[in-house]
Amino acid sequence: MDRALNVMFVVSEAVPFAKTGGLADVAGSLPLALSKAGLRVSVLMPLYGMIRQGGSDLTKAITDLEIPFDFFTLKGDVYSAVRDGVTFYFVERDEFFDRRQLYGTPKGDYFDNLERFVFFAKSFLPLCQALELKPDIIHCHDWQSALVPVYVREKWQDEAEVNQAATVFTIHNLAYQGLFAKEKYHLLDLDISLFGIDGLEFYDRINFLKGGILWSDVVTTVSQQYSREIQTPEFGCGLEGVLQTRAEVLTGIVNGVDYTVWNPATDNLIAAPYTPTSLAGKANNKKALMEEYQLDPTLQEAPLLGIVSRLADQKGFDLLAAILPELLADNVTLVILGTGEEKYHKLLSQAAAEYKGKIGVTIAFDNRIAHLIEAGADMFLMPSYYEPCGLNQIYSLKYGTIPVVRATGGLVDTIEPVDIKKKTGTGFLFQEYSPEAFLACIREACQAYQNKTLWKKIMANAMNRDFSWESSAKAYESLYRQALARKAAERSSA
């Protein structure tokens, strides 16, 4: 029997402690699923102000951990919290992390993000040494922790705590790369030879994400389709050539979801529970959602479309903006929850004022309303230009809220196209990224909605799909063992 692996996550956010997006959902849920599968798992992340203010039950694990930084040694306390068998460690340095937001303000990124996340990456080895931790797998996520695999190979290769470990690097969104001025390169404490086209240089700037891709033993993305797409010029964000050179160790594993949180049978944030075999509560939630947004009650039988999203071009809001007047002229209602680009804040707020009773908009993030939209809407719109994995379409399946999505990334991997004649499938997909294709797909779904027998079958198909973390955790464990075997083979051939 294989021995239990010791896995350490290095990540910049994780629920329930700090969140800006889907990365936090993964980093909060996957370690728990791995632990449940018998692995020993811990997580390292920064101690943000919101963690302290959020009332987390923290215990001081290390006092004055010494972390080398530039020509100095900076000190930071380390705190810990245990959640379902997983220990979360939080490295403290108030001038770096005690801020209102994680990475920046609406006006832009923090000016010292390089310094903040160099410090974070460099804290990893001293923490392992102080706590006598010796991970088999160091699993890093996105640009904020991408320097850790570089340091493991280039600076820490003689350190017993990490030099036997395999590094796994997961790209959650390739568009966010951690780009910084080359004048700050000295702060990385790496040889200048590593700043080149085959290293950390990217169009005369430092690229943290590129480091994670090049120096890790294994690279993953959050869906198989996205792992293929990012090797193309359209979705490679300038790194497609780099990713092609690592194609042999690049794979995709679809994110799971936490059904203890997202399940209409047990969800205490919605108006009424329901199941695939007892759908009456779905109508109660629709009524509650329409009342929440003061939608026209005479439209109760019309399709109610829902969106919970970052309001950004990437998420297809340029398509929505183009079709909004024509869509709202149809016999539908629409609710939208999210924050993002200022232009969409204005456009959607104006639409809510102009089309009262037809559209409801909340420019914020509200977890209760997010759950109510999943439970109360008939369809969920995700017209993303690209989507590494996506979680809301998976939540929607469980709630019988039929996804209408573009055929890209994880949306392809998680949504089976509806075949009306065979009554199979779980959602409606469109290929071409255009307003016309999006509107046609919505109207196709609305047409199917009129056939109640067909719609109930599609809802049942959707609600019975299983995207729990259990299967994803098994895939990660298998990947970890492959990474260790690769590392061992590399050492023996050296």
Image (spheres, rainbow, N blue to C red):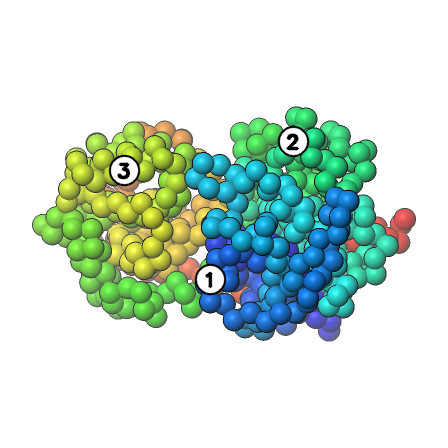
Q: What residue sits right under mark 3 in the picture?
A: 348
Asked if 301 appears above or below 471 in the picture, the reply is above
Along the line of sight, the residue nearer the viewer: 85 or 273: 85
Q: Determine the residue positioned at 15% across, 42% down.
A: 356
Tag nearer the camera, 3 or 2: 2
Residue 181 is tagged as 2
Along the line of sight, the residue nearer the viewer: 486 or 335: 335
Secondary element type, mark 1 = helix
Secondary element type, mark 2 = strand
Residue 384 x/y as whole percent: 41, 39
Secondary element type, mark 3 = helix
Residue 205 is tagged as none
Q: How many residues crowd around disc 2 within 10 Å: few (fewer than 14), some, or many (20 or more)?
A: few
Asked if 92 appears above or below 442 in the picture, the reply is below
Q: What residue sits right under mark 1 in the picture?
A: 53
Q: Determine the residue positioned at 68% across, 67% down.
A: 62
Quadrant placement of the N terminus: bottom right
Along the line of sight, the residue nearer the viewer: 215 or 469: 215
User: How far apart, in angstroms, are the residues tagged by discs 3 and 2?
Assistant: 36 Å
| Residue type at the position of mark 3 | Leu
Along the line of sight, the residue nearer the viewer: 256 or 134: 134
| Residue type at the position of mark 2 | Ala
Does residue 484 appear in the picture of this structure? no
Residue occupying the far left of the picture:
298
Residue occupying the far top of the picture:
203
